[in-house]
């Protein structure tokens, strides 16, 4: 049982260390409380042309003979020299949006758009690589409104969908002047859904009362624990229909080429079928499109990195510490000789 004693000693030391760190950080956080939150983050900008160039040169070094490589470098140098003499190339600002249910990525998107609109002109372009299956109406409404800022500024907006832009995701995608989709990407789901369980009968069976008190006739329509009424259901359905009508009108405004009543059924279509429904404009992946644009424009990838709060940084550090400690503990156990 010696290994158990060793492991218990190790575990006690680890727990003590973690608790000590927690106490210190709580004290630090308490001392900073009341000073206000520091805003922020920082905008990271990477030139994608350099990324494509580095990959091409690495491949050329491996594939071409020395004389071929030398000739290729001369051609590239000549082409670069001529490009400097020509007109300034247009710029493409590349953004990413990977959406969850709360459209959390909008916190970075809003800053990225604010930054690029200080510089972008109608001669430039914004490319949004969008992936989202939708989520909360108000959250995706805000995300779509951020993209409207680009349209209102007269800057061309191209939306690329490689996997999915459905429901709230398509609410964002429809803002684009053009929508490019991969052949098997999922688009559509122009509908509204809400669902919740109701435990009233279960509680009633066990003689448990649950009171719902409201001020306002429709402050609560459907509840999880209270008894739902037909009038409440009708009002809830009415609210869903109102939201759906707003969704349909929004899509129809920015995608005038679609027959909105045909596509606003809640159905989804794969890329090629979505093209036939005018939910997209072209079958093409974001990789293909950006690689093509890199030949004629300067591509800049923008990402606004949010600063982590003290609790978030502590959580990450504690998680890493615990993982390291557990791994070390298992290593010590595995090194014990169980059979003597």
Image (cartoon, rainbow, N blue to C red):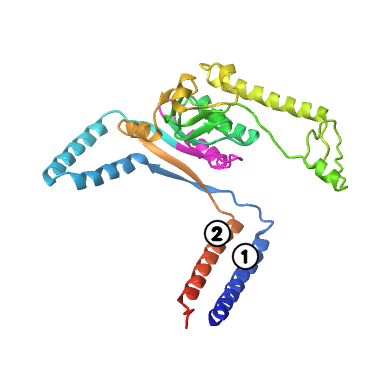
Q: Is residue 327 above or below residue 316?
A: below
Provide the secondary structure element on which disc 1 rests: helix
Q: Is residue 117 magenta?
A: yes
| Residue 8 in view in this figure | yes
Give the label on residue 25, or none.
1
Q: Is residue 8 above or below residue 178?
A: below
In the foreground, 78 or 287? 287
> Quarter of the image containing the N terminus?
bottom right
The reply, left or right, for residue 186 in relation to residue 220 is left
Say if mark 2 contacts mark 1, CB within 8 Å: no
Task: Residue under label 2, please give it.
Answer: 316
Residue 267 % position (x, y)? 57, 26
**Range shown magenta:** 95-124
| Residue 149 in view in this figure | no
Provide the secondary structure element on which disc 2 rests: helix
Q: Is residue 337 above or below residue 301?
A: below
In the foreground, 293 or 74? 293
Badge 2 crowding class, 10 Å Cα cut-off, few under 14, some 14 to 19, many 20 or more, is: few
Q: Is residue 58 above or below residue 149?
A: below
Tell me the residue at 60%/23% (across/down): 265
Q: Is residue 232 magenta?
A: no
Tell me the residue at 13%/41% (across/down): 68
Badge 1 crowding class, 10 Å Cα cut-off, few under 14, some 14 to 19, many 20 or more, is: some
Tell me the residue at 50%/38% (across/down): 97
In the foreground, 290 or 206? 206
């Amino acid at each position: 049982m010696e290994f158990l004693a060793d492991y218990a000693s190790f575990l006690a030391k680890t727990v003590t260390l973690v608790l000590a760190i927690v106490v210190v950080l709580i004290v630090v956080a308490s001392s900073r409380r009341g000073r206000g939150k520091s805003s922020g983050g920082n905008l990271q900008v990477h030139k994608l042309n350099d990324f494509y160039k580095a990959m091409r040169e690495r491949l050329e070094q491996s594939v071409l003979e020395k004389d071929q490589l030398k000739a290729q470098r001369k051609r590239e140098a000549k082409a670069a020299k001529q490009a400097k003499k020509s007109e300034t190339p247009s710029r493409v600002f590349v953004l990413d949006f990977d959406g969850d249910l709360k459209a959390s990525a909008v916190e970075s998107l809003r800053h990225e758009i604010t930054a690029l609109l200080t510089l972008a002109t109608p001669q430039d372009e914004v490319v949004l690589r969008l992936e989202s299956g939708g989520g909360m109406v108000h959250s995706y409404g805000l995300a779509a409104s951020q993209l409207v800022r680009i349209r209102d500024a007269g800057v061309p907006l191209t939306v690329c969908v490689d996997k999915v832009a459905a429901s709230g995701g398509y609410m964002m995608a429809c803002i684009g002047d053009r929508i490019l989709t991969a052949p098997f990407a999922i688009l559509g789901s122009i509908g509204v859904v809400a669902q919740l369980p109701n435990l009233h009968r279960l509680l009633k069976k066990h003689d448990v009362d649950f009171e719902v008190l409201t001020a306002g006739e429709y402050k609560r329509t459907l509840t999880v624990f209270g008894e739902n009424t037909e009038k409440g259901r009708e009002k809830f359905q009415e609210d869903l229909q109102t939201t759906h009508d707003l969704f349909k009108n929004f899509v129809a405004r920015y995608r005038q080429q679609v027959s909105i009543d045909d596509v606003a059924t809640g159905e989804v279509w794969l890329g090629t079928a979505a093209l036939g429904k005018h939910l997209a404009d072209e079958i093409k992946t974001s990789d293909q499109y950006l690689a093509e644009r890199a030949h004629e424009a300067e591509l800049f990838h923008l990402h606004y990195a949010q600063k982590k709060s003290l609790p978030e940084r502590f959580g990450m550090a504690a998680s890493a510490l615990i993982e390291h400690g557990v791994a070390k503990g298992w290593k010590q156990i595995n090194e014990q000789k169980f059979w003597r």
